[in-house]
Structures are given as structure tokens and as C-alpha cells.
Amino acid sequence: MELTRLKGWLLAIGFVVLVAVPPAVTAMDETFYITLISRIMIFAIAALSLDLILGFGGMISFGHAAYLGLGSYAVGILAFHEITNGWLQLFVAIGGSAVVALIIGAICLRTSGIYFIMITLAMTQLLFFIGISLETYGGDDGLPTDRSEFAAFIDLGNEWILFYLILGFLVLCMYISWRLINSRFGMVIRGCHENEARMQAIGFPTYRYKLLAFVISGSMCGIAGFLLANLTEFVTPEFMHWFRSGEIMIMVLVGGMGTLFGPVVGAFAFLMFEEIISGFTENWPVIFGPLLVLLVLFAKQGVWGLLPKSKAGDG
Amino acid sequence: MADPILKVEDLMKSFGGVVATDQFFFDIQQGEFHAIIGPNGAGKTTLVAQISGMLKPDSGRILFDGQDITGLSAAERSHLGLARSFQITSVFRHFSARQNVALSIQARQGHSFRFWKPAARDSSLTEPAMKILSDLGLANRANVLADNLSHGEKRQLEIAMALATDPKLLLLDEPTAGMGAEDSARIREFLGGLKGKYSMLLIEHDMDTVFSLADRVTVLVYGRGIATGTPEEVRGNAEVRAAYLGEDDAAHA
């Protein structure tokens, strides 16, 4: 998958704009936007991670919010027990998400189609109800939490620093995804999406590759959860609600399934739209719904897919 | 004498009440070009699926190069050297022709848990892929998306992908399916060139291809092998004429 020059430039410009956000909005005295954009970037990571399995692997996970919740609970629960070391929390967020993704994936990947969707959904609802029943950690009221502590120079209490940390993670996740998709492993995952029987016939034991992709995707979403808990200073089972899984999936659809960076754009488009339109009416989904239908009908590869493609047909 | 490359013993497979493969025995010798013919519904596709590992037989054994492979997966069989092409074109439509072949080469180079280096720029994949495409006369189509290839080219790519796994036995499921006479002739010529280099099992409707290339022919009717022999022997077999070549032909002969 190659990037066209146009897309390369758009990404570069987007990055520069994001870097300029904190000073610009502070100058305009609209610091609320630092929090909003931080939140959007976190969901961009979640959408990116979902696209790895959804767009490239053809695995329709309708339970991706599970890892958002797990990542955030790693921060909340550890902080509750006064373990505030950010590296440790991040490690637990990624590791915990990976283990749960391994278990869920090992079960779901024995099925396909609608069963796959339903089981990923059911598993995530299971985690949601476990979250509600954890009275010690706030149950359905949620749990206020402190921000992670890194070495002194990364003070997450500072909104600017948190913003740039999230931006850094977003860029890192985009770069890792890019390498992954173009690697031998990525080719196997994409091949499984297109024609799994053929992949087996030419000698790939497809199950283990798909399972690992599922685990990588879950772990990456766990990072988003870790960041979300830090941004909101609060963890709640709501992060794992199926509604959240649906929103992440919509971001992927809006940006473009299987376009790698499209979902990042999709997260911005969806959450900015929500932010702006919900200022006019609280029934904003009434407007968004038909727009989504139109988009899916007329632009199967989302807004990012509307841009010209590179010659080999991908990218 | 060396083991046959493929030996099928007493294979049985039924779907509900329909017996698709019925006490089927046959073998392919090393280097042999063996063809299986049979009318529609004879169970050819079911047989291919069982030999390639996509479908589990109810009973019986399949031996590949002396090893019992009945319980192995399709992927494991591929690694032992059993490659197949598909009757219904089954290429990766959104990959270029070269990427299609490169994926087969990647499969034979051990595991693909390699996450960093771009596969498209890996010369250990692209160079052998280009070589195979050149051999098939598809070199100038290497960068074209498989979806945009002509039907004939897709069928060739189908075979190229099987060849790229470096097989000992090529299982070709109707390689000329849906092809015009000219394309069919080209494939026939190409298969003739492969003869002797690989052991081959050809499932085919096209009689010209079968009778001009095969060393031996097995006739399958209702899941049973009713005759095996050289093309001349099979052509002369009364039972085969009755069952397959048609009473009319028998009457004229």
C-alpha cells in the first residue's frame, strides 16, 4: 500500500495543524479545544486499531470498546491501589488488553460472519457488566482517578503535555500500522480477508495469523483506553458499552474501511460533527444518520477513499 | 519401485443420502500426468476438496509421497508439496498479479510473522514472482490488479500461484474452465511444457486437453472410479462409453 503524494501532504499538514493547536487555542482563550482534540485523537487511535482487523482482516469486531475500557481500568484500578507509575499502567493496559483479546479472539475466530459479530458484541457486554458489578471500583458510578505519573518532565497534569503525549501516541500507532500492513504479516492478513480458502491452499495456517492481528488490534486500542482515563480522570463501564463500539465502527466507516489513515480522519469528522451540531440540537443523530447512509452508499471507502488512489490500486 | 506421489485408498464421502465419493481407489506415479474425467455431478470437485484438505473424508486414506496426510490441514499439505488451482478463479482480486504470486512464494518461505519490512520491496519475494510470471508470459501484466486481468489471464495466474508454492504434485481443477478455444490451446501448450517436471492431476471437461496430455485417465461416475488406463484404453472401454462418452459416440465408432 503506497501513499499518493496528495495524501502524504494532507497528513503532513494535518500533523502541523495539530502541533499548533495548543498554542493557537490558548492564544484565542478557547482552551476547551485542547481537551476536545485530545479526545478526538484518542478515538482516532481506537478507530485505527479497529480498522486493522475490520478493514484489512475482514473481522467485524462489534466489541472494540472492550479494550478502551480495559485500558482505562488499568489506570483506574492501579491508581486506586496507589500505583501511579505511568509506564507500569501503560504496560498493564496493553498487556491486559492483549490477554483479553487473545481469549475473545481464540473463541470468535472459530466462527465467521454474523456469529463473529454477535460473539464479539456479547463478550464486550460481559465485560461491561463485570465493570458495573465491581463495587470496589465504583460499579456503574465509575471511578475518579489521578493521572499517570511519568518522569518529572512528562507532567500529565499539564493539558499541553497530555495533548502532545496523545499526539505522539497517535503518530506512533499510525506508523506501526503502516509498517504492519505492508509487511509480510500484513499481506497475510489482507489475503485472509480476500480469500481465506486460497490462503490455506497456498500454505498459510490462517487462524494463527488472524488471531495475532486481533491481539495487536486490541492492544493498540488498550493504549487509547489508557489515554482516555488520563484525559477524563475518570473510568466508567460506559467506556465499554456497545454503543461506544458502534461509534468507533462508525468512525472507521466515515473515514474509510481498509484505508489505514481514513479512520483517523473519520474520528475527527465524526466527533467534530457531533460537537458542532449538538450545539444546535440535541437530536443531532437525526441529521447524522442519513448522512452516514449517503456516505456508505456513495463512498464505500469513506471520505479518505474519495481521494485519488495510487496506481497499484491501493493506498 | 518408488512410492506413488499420491495414493488414495477406499475413500468415502457422503452428504446426507448422497454418496459423492464411493470406495474410490487410485494413484499417481512420480512424474505422471494423470487426468480425472467424469460427467457433471460425478464428484470431481468433492474429490479435489478431499485431496487438497478442504473437506474431510468419512473414511479411507490419502497418502502423499508415502505419508498419510488424511488428517492434515490444507496448509500443511501445501507445505509438503501439494498445490492446487481452483475451478472457480480464486485469485486475490485487489492485489496485483505480482503480489498474488509473491504471496505464494511467501508461504513457502517459512512463517510470516514478520512485521516490519515492506513485502513489496522484498526482492526474495518479487524476483521469483517475476520469474514465474515471465514463464507464463504475464511479465508485462505484473503490476495490473488481478481484478483487471482478462479471464484467460486470471486462469493463468491461478496456475502461477500454484506453481509458486514449489509443488511436487499439481492438482489442477479445470484449468480451462470458461475459456475460449484460443486461450484453451495456450493453456494446453503450457501444461504440456510442465509435463514431466511435475506430477500432475488434472480434472478436466475439455477432452482435447485430457487426451492429448494425460499419461493415464481415470473415469469417475457417481463417485466411483469405473476405469483407469491410457487414453486409448479408456476411449475403448465399453463401460466408459456407455456412462460418459455417450451412447451416440459408441454407436458411431
Image (cartoon, rainbow, N blue to C red):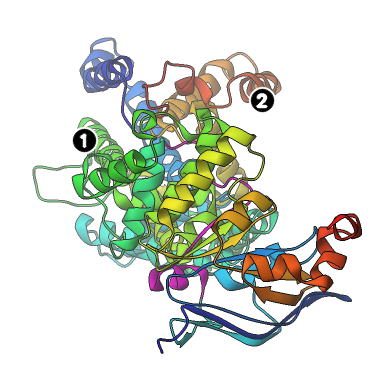
Within-10-Å neighbours for mark 1: few <14, some 14–19, many 20+ = few
Frontmost residue, B57 versus B81: B81
Residue type, label 1 = Asn
Q: Quadrant of residue A156?
A: top left
Within-10-Å neighbours for mark 2: few <14, some 14–19, many 20+ = some
Q: Which residues are magenta?
A: B73-95
Frontmost residue, A68 versus B57: B57
Residue that label 2 marks: A285
Q: Is residue A1 above or below residue A142?
A: above
Report the chain holding disc 2: A
Count of labels in the image = 2
Q: Is residue A188 above or below residue A27?
A: below
In the image, residue B208 lies at what x, y percent? 64, 49
Q: Report if residue B107 is visible in the image.
A: yes
Frontmost residue, A267 versus A192: A192
Magenta span contains residue B91: yes
Residue that label 1 marks: A158
